[in-house]
């Protein structure tokens, strides 16, 4: 007997994906605005933060793709849960006062290091979660609608 294919699994999946995307794109401007005055408040601070967050998101997607391609479902889920637990263990997010710079002409390296140490693992694991969840065969199989698609 197969488990029921009710709409709840699809709704929970959609809620999880939306919540993860909301968290991802709330952390980025929040932390960028937090450190902006520390490094002079210029456009290079915003650009460096954008570089970091887009690179971390890409790394999260790449690790999810590699895990889907080379790991069976059981170890893949175990790795995902371990990464999420590790990211939760590193909470709260927030750089300390020791990260404030003196008078550097090009603070990009220090900004990248600050972001990597303070939010790198958390951001990457949250970015990886959505694609890992979507690639799980059990979720794909249960979220299929029993009704045929509508034609316009």
Image (cartoon, rainbow, N blue to C red):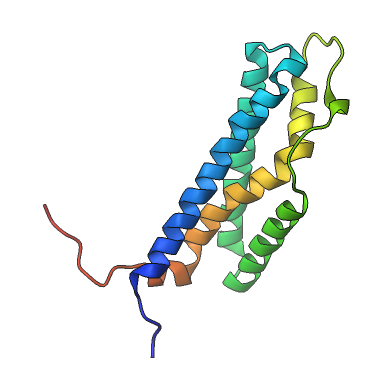
How far across and down, in percent of the image, does residue 140 sit? 41, 66
Residue 7 horizontal side relative to residue 92, left or right:
left
Residue 21 horizontal side relative to residue 4, left or right:
right
- Residue found at x 61% / y 67%: 77
Count up the numbered dots: 0
Q: Which quadrant would residue 11 be assigned to in this image?
A: bottom left
Q: Is residue 16 above or below residue 34?
A: below
How far across and down, in percent of the image, does residue 31 sit? 67, 30
Residue found at the far bottom of this picture: 1
Q: Is residue 102 visible?
A: yes
- Residue found at x 61% / y 49%: 126
How far across and down, in percent of the image, does residue 74 sit? 62, 73
Along the viewing direction, whichever of 103 and 131 lies nearer the viewer = 103
Q: Is residue 62 visible?
A: no
- Residue found at x 73% / y 11%: 40
Along the viewing direction, whichever of 114 and 68 lies nearer the viewer = 114
How far across and down, in percent of the image, does residue 27 sit? 62, 37
Q: Quadrant of the N terminus?
A: bottom left
Q: Which quadrant would residue 149 be assigned to in this image?
A: bottom left
Residue found at the far left of this picture: 152
Q: Which quadrant would residue 28 be assigned to in this image?
A: top right
- Residue found at x 62% / y 13%: 43
Q: Is residue 54 above or below residue 91?
A: above
């Amino acid at each position: 007997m197969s488990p029921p294919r009710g709409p709840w699994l699809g709704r929970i999946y959609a809620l999880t994906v939306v919540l993860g995307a909301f968290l991802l794109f709330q952390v980025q401007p929040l932390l960028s605005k937090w450190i902006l005055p520390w490094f002079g408040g210029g456009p290079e601070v915003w650009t460096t933060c954008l570089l970091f967050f887009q690179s971390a998101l890409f790394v999260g997607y790449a690790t999810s793709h590699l895990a889907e391609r080379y790991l069976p479902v059981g170890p893949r889920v175990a790795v995902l849960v371990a990464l999420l637990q590790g990211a939760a263990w590193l909470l709260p997010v927030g750089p300390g006062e020791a990260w404030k710079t003196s008078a550097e002409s090009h603070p990009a390296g220090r900004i990248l290091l600050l972001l990597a140490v303070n939010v790198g693992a958390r951001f990457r694991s949250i970015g990886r979660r959505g694609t890992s969840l979507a690639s799980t065969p059990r979720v794909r199989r249960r979220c299929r609608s029993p009704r045929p698609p509508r034609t316009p």
